[in-house]
Image (tube, grey):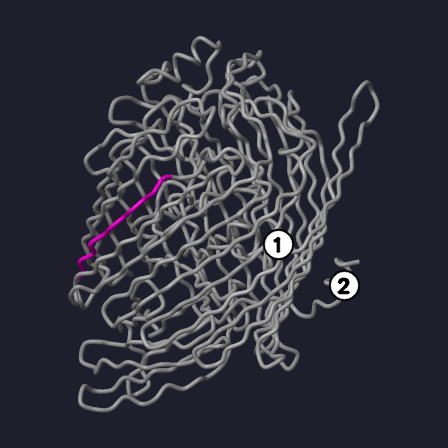
């Protein structure tokens, strides 16, 4: 009855918080490209594009201060209260003339629905310089974000020590369902196809459902062109550590109400090198394609269709797959891998083959008398095959089946609505999902299953001057049916869970200060892997055992943050605490098992009472007009309430700093020097090896841009692990057997015309 009442009382969906577009023009109405814009609530400055525009995809409602400057014009500060999608026009005039006031011209779409917590964004310029070998590597610039890796090409995003089933990973607006289980399931996206990254830290279960307990990470594709014409772009990349080459072709155009975009990318890499040896069988290859068509029906209404394909063949480090218990014990204690080979582009068993196909259709209205709305229909299919290193059927060249072959097919429908109500903004979201998993491999790691989800969330936002308030509630119901054939008969087991999520937040701004606090509670149901897994997971090189008695997981969270933003510098500190009466995770048992597929460490899924607490800091200072200092750090601790021991898989403390020097009149010409200091993680009971010691890594980057008659040419060089330091990372599955890759020189070339 409680669930039905919540569903009946829910009115309207969540649209995202405001999208702000600032247009900078001169007194003659011409756009001013290259103008510098500082927004006090964001971590970095921005530069207007060729049309004189800067766009912030989503901003929490409140009062903001903009600082606009350009050579030959007077620097000016202006303030505006933002509570809805807004286009701001700023007219700069000569140095001695007063600046006209700001005017509001209209409304635009806003892509990410959030609470009062600010969205942290990595823009295209940052990505073009620091883009790594996988999308997981894009997140190290965000405090509290990171990845858990099982190889150079397999990095799964984490947020505040949580991943997978507690973290929603969006490709534009669509959740990538292949990310909700398996630590070695990296996002099915090539970094070259990502235009920007947006991160919402903190429980977002009200807006995005049961799998958003840690937050939301959104990989945003390049924005669609609205002006008529055609544009092309070619990107080339090379990485020294594994002799990798990558290429991407991007084209977009528009004609009348129709706009389109097509992207193709490919990359191929050999085995990676550490400072002392090569990592055998870590070669990989990936191919990606995406096409988007946008049609504007009328002034505020449009329809968009997207088709995307990812296919990859990823080698699994051969030193993790060993034939007997003695070799496994020696490998866990040895200083270097037991399996070493000369470097090669060949991918031998064990390896993964992944195919991910998605189709999406979105209809939306940017504003009308009925409010703003969006309707999304999507289909995606993820097929994952893992080939065994020790069985004849492990080699796909033999034409036999993979050891593990599962196909996950998901249908999604999401409806959103937002309109003014109760002196504020009311939002409602309706989510419907159908997901089926079919196993066809030689081994059945997880039985076949079919799940359904129905969820409704409603929330309200108010702005009173310098105060901003948020309150929301959501109800979800999940059905899961699991079946397998035993003795010629079908054995089917049904499950059902239901629960609610609540969230409330309050933010106060005054002068340069801001203080905000939030509380939230959410829940999630255990998935089929946590309940029924039994067997070797070849991609992770572990033996996993599920628990069919697991109940749903519950979370309570509190967060407090303070920020100070002056004209030339800004700082923010965030502290949080998560309390899990039941925390479900794969925990090491301290035991190893010998199977016909080899010897592997044993992990079992358990539910434990646990706490996760942490603090995140970030600082940015404009030391001069050409030199900027950036600092960010996070310290996280997790422990079990029953015995006080450390929780497995919680990342160690991390502090990163960067000095960025650029030419004042052209930020694309720059030099950077960075340093990352990583502490030692807490060692959890029954782990197969103690947590590795901390380490310090240096990096450097430089870039420049040439405007040619035939287009725009951009060059950048990025060196990671500058001193070729040998280290092991706690958040890498390789740490049990080998070092992390050594010095990496990345060269990037981009040509636009």
Asked whether residue 525 is drawn in magenta, I would say no
Q: Residue furthest right?
A: 489
Q: Position of residue 374 (x, y in %)?
A: 62, 66
| Residue lying furthest front | 643
Q: Is residue 488 left or right of residue 627?
A: right
Q: Is residue 156 rendered to the left or right of residue 493? A: left
Alpha carbon of mark 1 to alpha carbon of mark 2: how far? 18 Å
Helix, strand or loop status at disc 2: helix
Q: Is residue 659 magenta?
A: yes
Q: Is residue 20 above or below residue 347?
A: below
Dominant SS in magenta: strand
Q: In the rendered structure, which disc, 1 or 2, sits on the residue that comes first in sequence? A: 2
Horizontal and vertical percent position of residue 275 = 24, 26
The part of the image, by quadrant, that contains residue 102 is: bottom left
Judging by the rendered image, the residue that carries numbered circle 2 is 5
Disc 1 target residue: 209
Asked whether 744 or 474 is in front, the reply is: 474
Residue at point 65%, 62% (across, down): 457
What residue is shown at x 30% (from left), y 52% (from top)? 632
In depth, the one of 735 and 645 nearer the eye is: 645
Residue at left offset 34%, top offset 47%? 131
Q: Residues within 10 Å of mark 2 (few under 14, many from 20)?
A: few
Mark 1 vs mark 2: give the one in front: 2
Q: Are marks 1 and 2 in contact (CB under 8 Å)?
A: no
Q: In this rendering, is residue 476 above or below 320?
A: below
From which residue to which does the magenta span run?
Answer: 652-662
Q: Residues within 10 Å of mark 1 (few under 14, many from 20)?
A: many
Residue 498 rendering spot, x and y as whole percentages: 72, 50
Say if 67 sits above or below 479 in the image.
below
Q: Choose top left, top right, bottom left or bottom right for residue 595.
A: top right
- Figure check: 346 above or below 215: above
């Amino acid at each position: 009855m409680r669930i039905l009442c919540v569903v009946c009382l829910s009115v309207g969906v969540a649209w995202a918080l405001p999208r702000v577009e600032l247009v900078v023009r001169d007194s003659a109405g011409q756009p001013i490209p290259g103008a510098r814009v500082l927004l006090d609530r964001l971590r970095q400055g921005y530069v207007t594009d060729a049309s004189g525009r800067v766009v912030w995809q989503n901003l929490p409602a409140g009062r903001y201060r903009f600082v606009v400057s350009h050579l030959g014009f007077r620097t000016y500060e202006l303030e505006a209260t933002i509570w809805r999608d807004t286009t701001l026009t700023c007219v700069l005039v000569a140095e001695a003339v007063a600046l006209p006031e700001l005017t509001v011209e209209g409304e635009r779409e806003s892509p990410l629905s959030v609470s009062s917590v600010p969205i942290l964004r990595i823009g295209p310029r940052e990505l073009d310089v620091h883009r790594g070998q996988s999308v997981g590597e894009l997140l190290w610039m965000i405090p509290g974000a990171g990845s858990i890796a099982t190889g150079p090409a397999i990095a799964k995003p984490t947020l505040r020590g949580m991943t997978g089933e507690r973290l929603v990973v969006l490709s534009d607006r669509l959740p990538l369902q292949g990310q909700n289980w398996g630590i070695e399931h990296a996002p099915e996206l090539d970094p070259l196809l990502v235009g920007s990254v947006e991160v919402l830290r903190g429980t977002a279960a009200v807006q995005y459902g049961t799998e958003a307990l840690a937050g939301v990470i959104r990989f945003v594709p390049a924005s669609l062109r609205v002006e008529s014409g055609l544009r092309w772009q070619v990107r080339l990349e090379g990485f020294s550590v594994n002799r990798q080459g990558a290429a991407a072709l991007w084209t977009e155009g528009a004609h009348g109400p129709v706009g389109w975009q097509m992207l193709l990318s490919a990359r191929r890499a050999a085995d990676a090198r550490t400072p002392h040896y090569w990592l055998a069988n870590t070669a990989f290859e990936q191919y990606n394609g995406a096409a988007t068509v946008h049609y504007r029906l009328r002034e505020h209404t449009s329809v968009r269709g997207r088709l995307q394909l990812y296919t990859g063949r990823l080698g699994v480090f051969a030193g993790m797959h060993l034939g007997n218990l003695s070799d496994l014990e020696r490998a866990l204690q040895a200083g270097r891998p037991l399996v070493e080979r000369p470097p090669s582009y060949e991918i031998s068993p064990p390896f993964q083959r992944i195919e991910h196909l998605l189709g999406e259709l979105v209809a939306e209205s940017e504003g009308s008398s009925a409010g703003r709305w969006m309707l999304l229909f999507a289909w995606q299919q993820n097929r994952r095959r893992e080939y065994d290193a020790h069985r004849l059927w492990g080699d796909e060249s033999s034409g036999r089946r993979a050891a593990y072959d599962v196909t996950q097919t998901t249908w999604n429908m999401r409806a959103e609505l937002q309109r003014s109500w109760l002196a504020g903004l009311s939002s409602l979201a309706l989510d419907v999902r159908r997901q089926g998993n079919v196993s066809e491999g030689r081994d059945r790691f997880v039985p076949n299953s079919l799940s359904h989800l129905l969820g409704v969330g409603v929330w309200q936002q108010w702005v009173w001057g310098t105060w901003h308030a948020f309150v929301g509630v959501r109800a979800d119901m999940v059905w899961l049916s699991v079946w397998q054939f035993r003795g010629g008969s079908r054995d089917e087991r049904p499950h059902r869970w239901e629960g609610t999520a609540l969230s409330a937040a309050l933010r106060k701004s005054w002068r340069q200060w801001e203080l905000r606090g939030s509380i939230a509670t959410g829940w999630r149901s255990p998935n089929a892997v946590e309940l029924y897994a039994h067997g070797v997971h070849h991609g992770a090189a572990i033996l996993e055992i599920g628990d069919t008695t697991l109940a749903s997981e519950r979370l309570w969270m509190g967060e407090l943050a303070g920020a100070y933003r002056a004209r030339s510098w800004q700082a923010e500190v965030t502290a949080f605490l998560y309390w899990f009466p039941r925390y479900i995770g794969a925990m090491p048992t301290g035991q190893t098992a010998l199977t016909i597929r080899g010897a592997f460490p044993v992990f079992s899924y358990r539910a434990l009472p646990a706490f996760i607490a942490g603090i995140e800091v970030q600082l940015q200072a404009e030391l001069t007009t050409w030199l900027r200092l950036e600092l960010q750090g996070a310290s996280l601790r997790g422990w079990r309430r029953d015995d006080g021991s450390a929780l497995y898989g919680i990342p160690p403390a991390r502090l990163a700093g960067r000095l960025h020097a650029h030419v004042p009149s052209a930020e694309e010409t720059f030099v950077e020097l960075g340093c990352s200091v990583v502490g030692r993680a807490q060692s959890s009971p029954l782990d197969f090896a103690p947590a590795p010691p901390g380490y310090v890594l240096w990096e450097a980057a430089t870039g420049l841009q040439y405007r040619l008659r035939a287009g725009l040419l951009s060059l950048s060089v990025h060196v990671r692990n500058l001193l070729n330091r040998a280290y092991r990372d706690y958040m890498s599955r390789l740490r049990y057997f080998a070092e992390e890759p050594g010095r990496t020189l990345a060269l990037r070339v981009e040509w636009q015309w």
